[in-house]
Image (cartoon, helix red, strand yellow):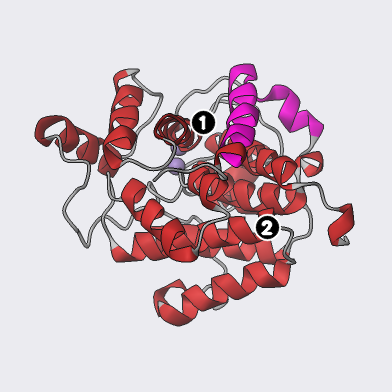
Amino acid sequence: MSVDACPGIGQRAVGAYLGLAVGDALGATVEFLTPREIRERYGVHRDICGGGWLRLKPGQVTDDTQMSLALGDAILNSRGVDAGAVAESFSDWMRGKPVDIGNTVRRGLVSYRSSGKAVVPESEYDAGNGACMRCLPIALAYWRQPEEKLCTASRLQCHVTHNNAVSDAGTETVLRMVVAALTGRPKESLQQLADELAHRHAVFRYMERRVENPGGWIVETLQAVFQAVFSNHGFESILVDVVNRGGDADTTGAIAGMLAGAYCGPDAIPDRWLEVLDDDTRKACRKQALDLISLAGQLVH
Ligand code: MN
Ligand code: MN
């Protein structure tokens, strides 16, 4: 597709946010199943039907989408990333008894409530995907900024719960890839960014073996996402591939969904998925995507 035929950045931002939410809702049904269990129960899992270990309603999303919205709200209120405001927004979200919450996230927020510090100590064990899964609002607000500013903002939000160099590196690459997609760069540019990550941190090398049943480790999560994004054409094929690998499928779905949605635009998302997506979530994602893109010219942090 030529650059002229691409939807504008606002539409790509909407595509990224709706992509994140439908990926989360689609993947949540098969979270923690193996590919074999998925085949036995669903054949190929390709419809947003709820259920799963969380017993979701069809179209209901999980922490991946909800924490993204909480981060985006904090960014809009502070006109940029203020770590204290982000921690407060996450803490409010946790108070609402979310349908699920990761252990590292819970530990970080409990520590924020008792210490008032919006940064956890550096830890080699905090290389989960919990900071990366919620990173989209950073890309939407900071896409016009120099890379150092994008990365500084990313680390502030990540370190509220996950202070780890591997999580930071993976998240910053996802952000750069989203920004590249938002600005209409071709898929090869996205792949170049993934390859640079694998070059700097060999642990991320993603072409050696097919990742199935990816766990919550950021490395396995991104390997599965990169394989699905780069070996399929079109939003639906990418998402169906990644969630049918099972494991942390709502999160691989969410991250693949934000990348593919930014790249393909919202019209590429199947109507049958958008129609079943929870109404309030769909409206919130669409509105926040546009609000964050408008904020991008007027950041104060
Ligand atoms: Mn989740
Ligand atoms: Mn998950």
Badge 1 residue CB within 8 Å of ligand 1: no
* Residue type highlighted by circle 2: Ala
Q: Nearer the viewer, residue 110 or 140?
A: 140
* Quarter of image, ligand 2: top left
Task: Sort mark 2 into few (<14), some (14-19) or many (20+) by Cα contacts within 10 Å.
Answer: many
Give the residue displayed 59% in from the left and 32% down from the top: 291
* Residue type highlighted by circle 1: Gly
Q: Nearer the viewer, residue 291 or 275?
A: 291
Give the residue displayed 23% in from the left and 35% down from the top: 109
- Image quarter where the N terminus lies is bottom right
Q: Mark on residue 181?
A: 2
Contact (Cβ within 8 Å) of mark 1 with mark 2: no
- Furthest residue toward left: 115
Magenta segment, which residues? Answer: 271-293
Judging from the image, what secondary structure is the residue with disc 2 in? helix
Give the residue displayed 34% in from the left and 50% down from the top: 158
* Count of picture labels: 2
The x, y position of residue 92, in whole percent, is 32, 23
Q: Main secondary structure of the magenta part?
A: helix
In the image, residue 287 above or below residue 218: above
User: In the displayed structure, does residue 185 sit left or right of residue 179?
Assistant: right
In the image, residue 280 above or below residue 144: above
Q: Can residue 212 be seen by looking at this rendering?
A: no
User: In the displayed structure, does residue 10 sit left or right of residue 268?
Assistant: left
Q: Nearer the viewer, residue 197 or 26?
A: 197
User: In the displayed structure, does residue 165 sit left or right of residue 172?
Assistant: left
The x, y position of residue 283, in whole percent, is 64, 22
Q: Label 1, on which residue?
A: 52
The x, y position of residue 292, in whole percent, is 56, 38
User: In the displayed structure, does residue 187 sit left or right of residue 222?
Assistant: right
Quadrant of residue 29 in the image?
A: top right
